[in-house]
Image (cartoon, rainbow, N blue to C red):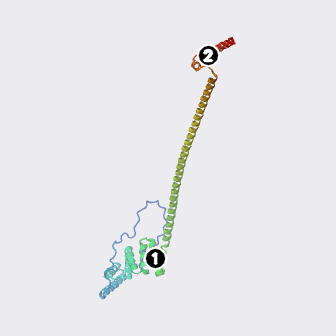
């Protein structure tokens, strides 16, 4: 892009040269458009001047005329000086800032030109001229989207074919930017969805682990309860066995006592004889022989008595 003699941007045609494909090079640092432009903007209209005297008005008009004459003589720097001096008098209009912006654009000072246009639009938001000039400044600064927006706004306010043709230069670039924005959004949505899936998968696995842990705890509690119940049943069985054993021992003891009582009841001998027999430590066969001998002797005695 270069500034033409009529103050409008002209797209230079690149020569049609067929070149061999070059080896990929390392990315270079981005080039800042118009990096050599002076950082200072031209002086503005003083805020404390609310109204111009007739003398101040005449002086301002004279300076504006001198600026126009300098422009006709292709003396842009001199024209800028005259216009700046006219603005410094005070009460500068939106049109004055727009005209100085045109001069700044001719001097390849797009940042200062855009600043003057912004001041002009603050005073007159319907200035199509200010929008168009600022659009060209943004275009010089490769601020494609801002340039496109300013061109479209300026054309809606004050349409002209020449500016419309200038704006068409931006269409491929805007489409490229929009496509890149769509691709970026899709990429963000994709990776955002992937991130969501990872988070959901993590939460799902954590939920499974938690459920497994709770199931293990429930099983452990059930096993413990079952063990306690089994132990309780075992204790009850052992208790029943002890009761049965004690009952059997009691019944046996009672039967022995009853048997001894019946035997004692049928034995007419004195107690001392029964105790003596009970405490006799001799073998059973000796006691049996003695009983038989005593029984025989008693039989003989009975026979003799008869």
Q: Nearer the viewer, residue 274 or 200?
A: 274
Q: Is residue 87 visible?
A: yes
Q: Measured along the vertical axis of the image, is residue 157 above or below residue 287?
A: below
Q: Quarter of the image holding residue 133?
A: bottom left
- Mark nearest the camera among 1 and 2 is 2
Q: Residue at coordinates 51% horizontally, 59% vertically from top-left?
A: 196
**Marks 1,2: beta carbons within 8 A:** no
Q: Earlier in the sequence, mark 1 or mark 2?
A: 1
Q: In the image, is 266 to the left or to the right of 179?
A: right
Q: Does 112 sit left or right of 162 as displayed? A: left
Assign the N terminus to one quadrant of the image: bottom left
Residue drawn at 63 percent across, 24 percent down: 265
Residue at x 57% of width, y 36% of height: 239
**Closer to the camera in the image, 183 or 30:** 183
Q: Residue furthest front?
A: 306
Query: Could you say which quadrant of the image residue 258 lies in?
Result: top right
Q: Position of residue 2 (x, y in %)?
A: 42, 74
Q: Secondary structure at mark 1?
A: helix
Residue 91, position as x, y percentages in the image: 34, 83
- Please name the residue that numbered disc 2 is placed on: 287
């Amino acid at each position: 892009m270069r500034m033409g003699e009529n103050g409008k941007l002209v797209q230079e045609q690149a020569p049609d040269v067929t070149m061999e494909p070059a080896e990929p090079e390392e990315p270079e640092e981005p080039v800042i458009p118009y990096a050599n432009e002076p950082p200072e903007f031209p002086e503005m209209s003083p805020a404390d001047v609310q109204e111009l005297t007739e003398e101040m008005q005449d002086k301002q008009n004279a300076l504006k005329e001198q600026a126009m004459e300098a422009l006709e003589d292709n003396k842009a720097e001199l024209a800028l000086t005259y216009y700046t001096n006219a603005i410094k008098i005070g009460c500068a209009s939106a049109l004055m800032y727009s005209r100085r912006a045109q001069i700044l654009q001719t001097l390849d000072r797009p940042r200062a030109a855009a600043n003057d246009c912004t001041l002009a639009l603050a005073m007159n938001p319907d200035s199509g001229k200010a929008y168009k000039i600022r659009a060209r400044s943004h275009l010089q600064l490769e601020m494609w989207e801002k340039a496109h927006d300013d061109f479209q706004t300026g054309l809606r306010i004050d349409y002209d074919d020449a500016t419309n043709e200038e704006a068409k230069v931006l269409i491929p670039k805007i489409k490229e930017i929009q496509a890149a924005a769509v691709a970026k959004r899709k990429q963000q949505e994709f990776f955002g969805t992937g991130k969501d899936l990872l988070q959901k998968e993590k939460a799902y696995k954590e939920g499974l682990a938690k459920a497994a842990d709770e199931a293990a705890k429930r099983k452990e509690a059930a096993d413990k309860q079952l063990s306690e119940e089994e132990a309780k049943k075992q204790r009850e069985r052992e208790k029943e066995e002890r009761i049965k054993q004690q009952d059997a021992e009691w019944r046996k003891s009672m039967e022995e006592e009853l048997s001894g009582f019946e035997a004692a009841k049928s034995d007419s001998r004195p107690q001392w004889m029964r105790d003596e027999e009970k405490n006799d430590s001799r073998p059973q066969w000796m006691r049996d022989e003695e009983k038989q001998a005593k029984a025989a002797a008693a039989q003989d005695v009975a026979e003799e008595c008869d």
